[in-house]
């Protein structure tokens, strides 16, 4: 059975399109919280041609990404498929990603800054570090 058609981006023409995306490792294996996986993610993010990664954070068994497409209607599957494929290739991974992803188009009542904070604070909320700033597997820029 195929996936249902994607709902078009119904935002004001001047509103930036930003997605909050989560990718999970199949079986929730804890394989992402290491320098090699972070380097693979950083390399994959740099290779993207039609997406800009605003922020990304590797947790032990999942990855959060805040990203904006160059074209409003760009399929999120292009972003997630590329990240998944390139990371596994770079790592020579024995593990697999869960099929699909969780993605959310940020609407007018949601803020990219709020999602950025959610991503940034995730390691502290999970008890992995006392202060989120101490988690080394974060890629992003401070949002005002």
Image (cartoon, rainbow, N blue to C red):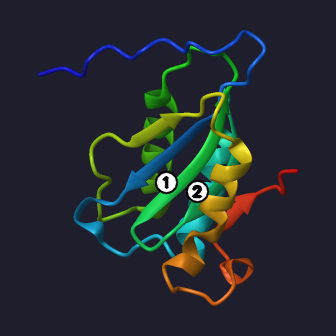
Taking the spot 66% from the left edge, 28% from the top edge, the residue there is 108
For mark 1, give the secondary structure.
Answer: helix
Of the numbered discs in the image, which one, if any, rests on residue 87? Answer: 1
Q: In the picture shown, does residue 108 fall above or below 88?
A: above
Q: Residue at x 63, y 15 (%)?
A: 11
Q: Residue at x 47, y 70 (%)?
A: 32
Residue 48 falls in image quadrant: top right
Q: Which quadrant holds residue 123?
A: bottom right
How crowded pointer 2 is (Cα within 10 Å; few <14, some 14-19, many 20+) is rated as many
Tell which of 59 and 40 is nearer to you. Answer: 59
Residue 126 visible within the image: yes
Q: Which mark is residue 101?
A: none
Q: Residue furthest front?
A: 109
- Comes first in the chain, label 2 or label 1: 2
**Quadrant occupied by the N terminus:** top left
Q: Are marks 2 and 1 in contact (CB under 8 Å)?
A: yes
| Measured Cα–Cα span from mark 2 to mark 1 | 6 Å
Q: Can the viewer see residue 48?
A: no
Q: Is residue 99 depicted above or below 56 in this figure?
A: above
Residue located 26% across and 18% down the image: 4
Q: Nearer the viewer, residue 36 or 1?
A: 1
Location of residue 128 in the rendering, given as x and y in whole percent from the top left corner: 53, 85
Image check: 32 left or right of 54?
left
Q: Position of residue 51 (x, y in %)?
A: 66, 31
Residue 18, image x, y percentages: 64, 32
The disc label shown at residue 41, or none: 2
**Figure quadrant of residue 67:** top right
Position of residue 78 relative to residue 54, above or below, is above
């Amino acid at each position: 059975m195929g996936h249902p058609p994607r709902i078009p981006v119904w935002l004001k023409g001047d509103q930036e399109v930003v997605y909050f995306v989560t990718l999970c490792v199949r079986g929730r294996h804890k394989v992402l919280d290491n320098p090699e996986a972070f380097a693979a993610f950083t390399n994959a993010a740099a290779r993207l041609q039609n997406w800009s990664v605003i922020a990304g954070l590797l947790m032990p068994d999942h990855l959060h990404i805040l990203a904006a497409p160059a074209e409003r209607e760009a399929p999120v599957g292009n972003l997630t498929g590329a990240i998944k494929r390139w990371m596994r290739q770079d790592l020579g991974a024995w593990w697999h990603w869960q099929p699909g992803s969780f993605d959310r188009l940020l609407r007018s009542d949601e803020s990219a800054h709020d999602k950025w904070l959610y991503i940034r604070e995730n390691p502290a909320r999970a008890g992995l570090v006392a202060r989120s700033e101490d988690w080394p597997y974060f890629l992003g820029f401070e949002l005002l």
